[in-house]
Image: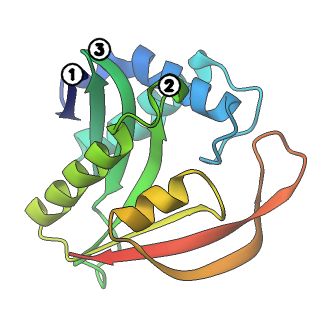
C-alpha cells in the first residue's frame, strides 16, 4: 500500500532536503513542467534554486515549503508565499508545485494541495491564487481542488524547451 505524508520543511530540515528537492525539480523541468526554468536543467540547478532563493524565504517566515513523501521518499513539493504587499494580508500564492514524474497519478499532488489549504488557513489567509500553463496536466488537478479560473494570458512564457510561447491560466480559491 502507498503511504503519502506531508511535511512542512523549516530550520535544519531544509539543508538536508536540498538534494532530493533539486532532483525532483530537475526531473519535472526535464519532463516539460512550466515552473519558470529552461532545459537543460540539472539537479545542481535545482539545489542552487532551493538553497539560494527558497530556503532564505522560508527561514524569514515569508514562505512555507511543503514536501510530500511517498513511501518515505520525497516525491513532490509546493510552496506557499504568505508575505505579500500590505494591502493583501488575506491572500497567499502557490508557487512551484511539482511532483516527480514517477510519482504522478498516485495522489501526491492532491495531498499536497490539501495540506497547502490547511497551511493557508493556519496563516489566516482567505484567498489563494496561482498561475499554471494553460492546458497543462496540473490544471485539472487545481480545478478538482476547488480552484476557479480567473483568466488566461496568451503568450505568457516560453515552454521549458524554448520552442514556443504558452498561455498561462490564473486561478483562485476562496477558503
Q: Residue visible at 29% across and 63% down?
A: 83
Question: Label for residue 131?
Answer: none
Q: Nearer the viewer, residue 42 or 53?
A: 42
Display coloring: rainbow
Q: Is residue 4 visible?
A: yes
Question: Label for residue 24?
Answer: 2
* Residue under label 3: 16
Q: Nearer the viewer, residue 141 or 164?
A: 141
Quadrant hosting residue 39: top right
Q: Quadrant of the C terminus?
A: bottom left
**First reached walking from the N terminus: tag 2 or tag 1:** 1
Q: Nearer the viewer, residue 135 or 17?
A: 135
Q: Nearer the viewer, residue 42 or 164?
A: 164
* Labels 1 & 3 near each other (Cβ < 8 A): yes
Give how far apart the Cα atoms at labels 1 and 3 are.
Answer: 5 Å
Give percent across and percent down for residue 64.
26, 47
Question: Taking 30 as reference, is 1 left or right?
Answer: left
Q: How many marks?
A: 3
Q: Secondary structure at mark 3?
A: helix
Give percent across and percent down for residue 54.
40, 39
Nearer the observer, disc 2 or disc 1?
Answer: 2
Residue 171 to residue 113: above or below: below
Question: Taking 117 as reference, is 100 left or right?
Answer: right
Give how far apart the Cα atoms at labels 2 and 1 are.
Answer: 17 Å
Give percent across and percent down for residue 80.
32, 54
Give percent across and percent down for residue 9.
22, 32
Q: Quadrant of the N terminus?
A: top left
* Residue under label 1: 13
Q: Residue visible at 50% across and 25% down?
A: 24
Q: Residue visible at 27% across and 24% down?
A: 69
Amino acid at each position: 500500500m502507498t503511504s503519502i505524508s506531508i511535511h512542512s520543511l523549516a530550520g535544519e530540515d531544509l539543508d538536508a532536503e536540498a538534494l532530493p528537492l533539486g532532483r525532483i525539480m530537475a526531473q519535472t523541468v526535464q519532463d516539460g513542467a512550466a515552473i519558470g526554468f529552461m532545459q537543460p536543467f540539472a539537479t545542481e540547478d535545482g539545489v542552487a534554486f532551493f538553497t539560494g532563493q527558497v530556503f532564505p524565504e522560508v527561514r524569514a517566515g515569508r514562505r512555507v515549503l511543503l514536501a510530500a513523501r511517498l513511501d518515505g521518499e520525497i516525491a513532490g513539493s509546493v510552496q506557499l508565499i504568505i508575505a505579500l504587499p500590505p494591502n493583501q494580508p488575506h491572500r497567499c500564492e502557490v508557487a512551484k508545485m511539482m511532483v516527480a514524474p514517477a510519482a504522478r497519478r498516485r495522489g501526491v499532488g492532491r495531498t499536497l494541495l490539501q495540506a497547502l489549504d490547511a497551511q493557508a488557513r493556519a496563516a489566516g489567509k482567505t484567498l489563494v491564487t496561482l498561475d499554471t500553463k494553460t492546458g497543462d496536466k496540473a490544471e485539472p488537478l487545481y480545478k478538482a481542488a476547488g480552484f476557479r479560473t480567473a483568466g488566461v494570458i496568451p503568450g505568457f512564457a516560453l515552454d521549458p524547451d524554448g520552442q514556443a510561447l504558452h498561455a498561462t491560466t490564473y486561478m483562485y480559491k476562496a477558503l
